[in-house]
């Protein structure tokens, strides 16, 4: 196609009845003298004729409206089902965080209780040990014939306790 | 009541549809069902699917009539719903699942590329299949502008509004669609008529 030829997009628009009056006149005048553009225009026209004579339109079925009404009725019943399902799903989904939170809280409470029990047991044993060691050190370091020493002698030996 | 509605403008009808007036909806459907069905039919090349999709579109219109903003013509809004539905639907690969290629049809003997054929009806059917198949193979947007322009006689201005495109973009898409078809169809038909 020559450089001065019509832009094929414009030629196509021209054949579709588009473009301004001025553009149409310019194209018409160019087509009179340009064989390349005439050929392009002729091919596009042939294509349009071919398209116009094939792929003919169809008629809607006689039950179109009836089926449409049915679809709308079916469609309108869906939101209710969706709402119920939605609520079930919401409850299902909310059960997971609620359960997890409850489990964490329960773990804290149980951990606290167990900790307290273990602490009490261990502190009692430790306290006993401290008392024993303090007691024996005091008694052993007291002067002979003192009241403390006499008391210490009255106590059973360590292995007998 | 229905007679009164029949004289109403599209804007009045859509307003009534937004208020769930079934009679107004029925009139609107009657008015547009042919165009809507045939846009989809030309786009999908499948009659059954076209009817199903048309109904889905009218269901959508029934439910979303209250979203119409009265900034465009009702017809433009309806065609926009159609175009968006088709392009989105196509993206989900649901449309045209059962369209056969030209080669497949030829291999199965369903079409015979033969210039000596005498039966006009069969010839028309054959031509129809080839045109349908060629259009169906076009990229989606080419196909849609072509359907709106060639088969629905929409102006470039209307297509630009329906598809949210500039007029030069529409011009370009239509030309490219025609160029693609020309490349495929003209050699075949020239051969057929002995050129």
Image (spheres, coloured by chain):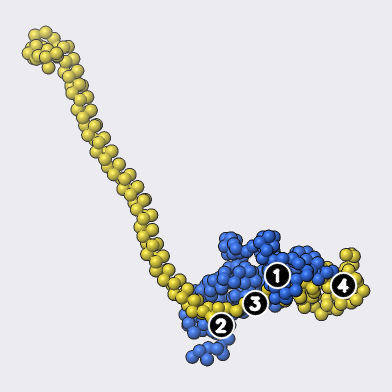
**Residue occupying the far top of the picture:** A144
- Cβ–Cβ below 8 Å for labels 2 and 1? no
- Judging from the image, mark 2 belongs to the subunit labelled B
Q: Earlier in the sequence, mark 2 or mark 1?
A: 2
> Image quadrant of residue B139?
bottom right
Q: Eyeballing the image, is A71 above or below B136?
A: below
Front tag of 1 and 4: 1
Give the residue at x 19% y 18%: A133
Q: Colour of chain A?
A: yellow
Location of mark 3 (residue): A57
To which residue does mark 2 refer? B30
For label 2, the crowd category at 10 Å Cα-Cα, with few meaning under 14, some 14 to 19 and many 20 or more, is: few
Q: Are marks 4 and 3 on the same chain?
A: yes
Q: Chain of mark 1?
A: B
The chain that appears blue in the image is B
The image shows residue B120 at horizontal and vertical percentages of 73, 76
Distance from label 2 to label 3 (Cα)? 16 Å
Residue position for label 4: A38
The crowd level at tag 4 (other Cα within 10 Å; few <14, some 14-19, many 20+) is: some
- In the current view of this chain or complex, which residue is farthest to the right? A33
Left or right: A161, with A102 as reference point: left
Indicate which label's residue lies in the foreground, 2 or 3.
3
User: x, y (%) of residue B116?
Assistant: 78, 70
Q: Secondary structure at mark 1?
A: helix
Vertical side of B28 occupied by A12: above or below: above
Report, in whole angstroms, how far the alpha carbon at label 1 lies from the one at label 3.
16 Å
Measured in 3D between alpha carbons, the distance from the residue under mark 1 to the one under mark 4, in whole angstroms, is 29 Å
Front position in the image: B78 or A122: B78
The residues bearing labels 2 and 4 have C-alpha atoms spaced at a distance of 43 Å
Which picture quadrant has residue B138? bottom right
């Amino acid at each position: 196609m020559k450089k001065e030829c019509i832009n094929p997009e414009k030629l196509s628009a021209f054949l579709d009845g588009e473009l301004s009056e001025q553009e149409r006149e310019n194209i018409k005048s160019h087509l009179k003298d340009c064989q390349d553009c005439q050929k392009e225009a002729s091919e596009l026209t042939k294509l349009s004729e071919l398209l116009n004579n094939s792929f003919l339109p169809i008629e809607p079925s006689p039950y179109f409206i009836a089926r449409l009404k049915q679809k709308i009725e079916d469609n309108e019943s869906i939101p209710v089902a969706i709402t119920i399902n939605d609520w079930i799903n919401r409850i299902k989904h909310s059960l997971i965080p609620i359960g997890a939170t409850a489990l964490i809280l329960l773990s804290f409470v149980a951990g606290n209780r167990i900790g307290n029990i273990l602490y009490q047991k261990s502190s009692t044993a430790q306290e006993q040990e401290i008392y024993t060691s303090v007691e024996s050190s005091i008694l052993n370091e007291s002067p002979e014939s003192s009241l403390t020493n006499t008391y210490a002698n009255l106590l059973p030996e360590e292995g007998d306790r | 009541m229905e007679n009164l509605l029949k004289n109403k403008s599209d804007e009045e009808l859509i307003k009534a549809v937004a208020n769930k007036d079934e009679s107004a909806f029925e009139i609107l459907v009657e008015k547009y069902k042919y165009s809507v069905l045939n846009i989809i039919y030309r786009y999908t090349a499948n009659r059954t699917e076209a009817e199903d999709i048309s109904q889905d579109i009218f269901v959508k219109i029934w439910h979303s009539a209250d979203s119409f903003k009265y900034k465009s013509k009702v017809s433009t809004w309806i065609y926009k719903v159609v175009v968006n539905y088709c392009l989105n639907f196509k993206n989900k690969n649901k449309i045209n699942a059962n369209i056969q290629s030209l080669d497949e049809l030829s291999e199965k003997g369903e079409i015979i590329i033969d210039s000596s054929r005498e039966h006009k009806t069969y010839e028309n059917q054959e031509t129809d299949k080839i045109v349908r198949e060629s259009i169906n193979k076009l990229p989606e947007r080419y196909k849609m502008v072509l359907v709106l322009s060639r088969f629905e006689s929409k102006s470039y201005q209307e297509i630009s509004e329906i598809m949210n495109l500039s007029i030069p973009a529409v011009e370009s898409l239509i030309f490219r669609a025609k160029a693609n078809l020309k490349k495929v169809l003209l050699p075949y038909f020239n051969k057929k008529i002995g050129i």
